Amino acid sequence: MEKILVIADAYFEKSVALEQADKLAKAYNATLHVVYFYYEDLRGLGEKGSAFKQTILDKMEEKANDQLADVCSNNDCTYEVVWQKNIQNWICDYAEREQPLMVIKTGHRSETMFYTPTDWHLIRECPTPVLIVAEDKWRKTPNILAAVDLRTELADKQALNHKILAQATSLASKLNTKVHVCYTPLFSKLLRDLGIKFKDEVERQAEKALATMINKLALKYGIDEKNFHIHAGKPEQVIPSMAAKYHAGVVVIGTVGRKGLSQKFIGNTAENILSFLKTDILAIKP
């Protein structure tokens, strides 16, 4: 049986991730493993630090048990309380070892140059799909929007397109909803302003060039061809707009992790659009 790893919301204030995970566990007939993280620097307390730590863990165990009894309707639900500062390392190690169906976490959608929230680390580094759950959504409707790069010639990105579409259609099947597919050809605003190239021209050229591929993908994944949408522009602007237009509750997108300074200064598409989307986002790695 598949397993879903859930990162509980901090300090029991909310249960956004847990509620979404409970729904998906039913849809996939999966088990849930919920992790409550806590950390505090107790080095200055000496021997009292160990006792204080155990007291905290015991109280969190009680509160976790109470919360799960109220929120989680899945009988196959386990949990643990983990004392951990760098939770992304623990999550990535768990995902590598246990290979869960997905990791679910409530979104923290902000980033500064020298502070990288856990969400970004997971999108870049976690080996399994990561579902970042939105606290406030546009709509309750659960349509799925798959964002793909249909014109890529790179084998790994073509394979990633197929993973995205497979995940999107699987999720739509479980939730009994529709899949829309969005491709965003890059379009230069400067060329438009200079009258050299126009947005509708870029879209028509892409539609003509991709007609055969779209037909094959539509047949392979059982998606209506009219649900393939080509809109030129910047992905971080177009994809949130398409999510709103087609009533998407989840956007499925590919992401490629970066290391070092490049991850600070060059955000990939998934990271760029996360700040604008008011939906859940399911990030898939190659």
Image: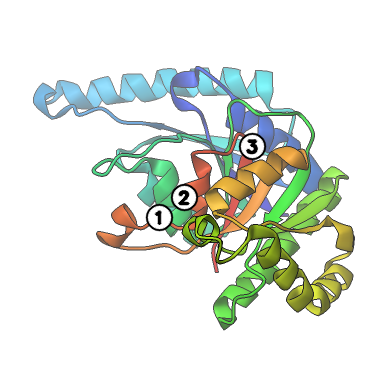
- x, y percentage for residue 26? 79, 40
Write down the residue under mark 1. Answer: 267
Image quadrant in which you'd find residue 104:
top right
Q: Is mark 2 on a helix, strand or loop?
A: helix
Mark 3 Cα shell of 10 Å, populated few (<14), some (14-19), many (≥20) = many
* Closer to the camera in the image, 161 or 91: 161
Q: How far apart are marks 1 and 3 (CA)?
A: 19 Å
Q: What residue type is labelled 2?
A: Glu
**Quadrant housing the N terminus:** bottom right
Say which mark, if any, is on residue 279. 3
The residue that appears at 63% across and 49% down in the rendered structure is 239
Image quadrant in which you'd find residue 82:
top left
* Closer to the camera in the image, 171 or 8: 171
Do tag 1 and tag 2 residues touch (Cβ < 8 Å)?
Answer: yes
Do tag 3 and tag 2 residues touch (Cβ < 8 Å)?
Answer: no
Q: Is mark 1 on a helix, strand or loop?
A: loop
Q: Tell me: 191 left or right of 244.
A: left
Q: Which of marks 1 and 3 is nearer the N terminus?
A: 1
Q: Which amino acid does label 3 sit on?
A: Thr
Say which mark, if any, is on residue 271. 2
The residue that appears at 24% across and 22% down in the rendered structure is 51
